[in-house]
Amino acid sequence: MSDYEAVHAFLWEISECLKPRTQAFFKQVIEDAYPGFEVHEKRATRILPDHVMMGMLPNILYDDDLDVKW
């Protein structure tokens, strides 16, 4: 129960920092039982439709880091 309360408090703090329009979208996402998954279509969807996310691992060379001679 304490984990649930901690997550709830964390999400509330985030929502307080958002503009009203964004708060409504955020509320819709966190109230969804399966965020990022379209149940009726049985497929994954995007949670943030206008954002491109990229994750990078530390200590790994990526294309921009490589010393390539063309």
Image (spheres, grey):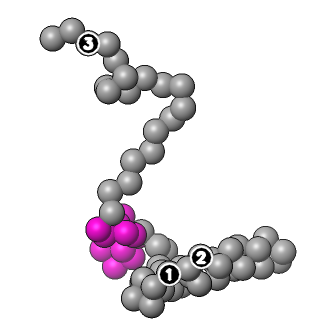
- At mark 3, the secondary structure is loop
Name the residue at 72% across, 79% down: 9
| Rendered location of residue 13, percent (x, y) | 65, 79
| Rendered location of residue 37, percent (x, y) | 40, 70
Amino acid under disc 2:
Ile
- At mark 2, the secondary structure is helix
Residue 64 in sight here: yes
Is 66 positioned to the left or the right of 2 in the image?
left
Mark 3 / mark 2, whichever is N-terminal: 2
Q: Residue furthest top?
A: 69
The residue carrying mark 3 is 68
Disc 1 to disc 2: CB gap under 8 Å: yes
Name the residue at 32% across, 13% down: 67
Is 39 positioned to the left or the right of 11 in the image?
left
The residues tagged by marks 1 and 2 sit, at their Cα atoms, a distance apart of 7 Å
Q: Which mark is residue 18?
A: 1
Q: How many numbered badges does the structure rendering display?
A: 3
Name the residue at 84% across, 74% down: 2
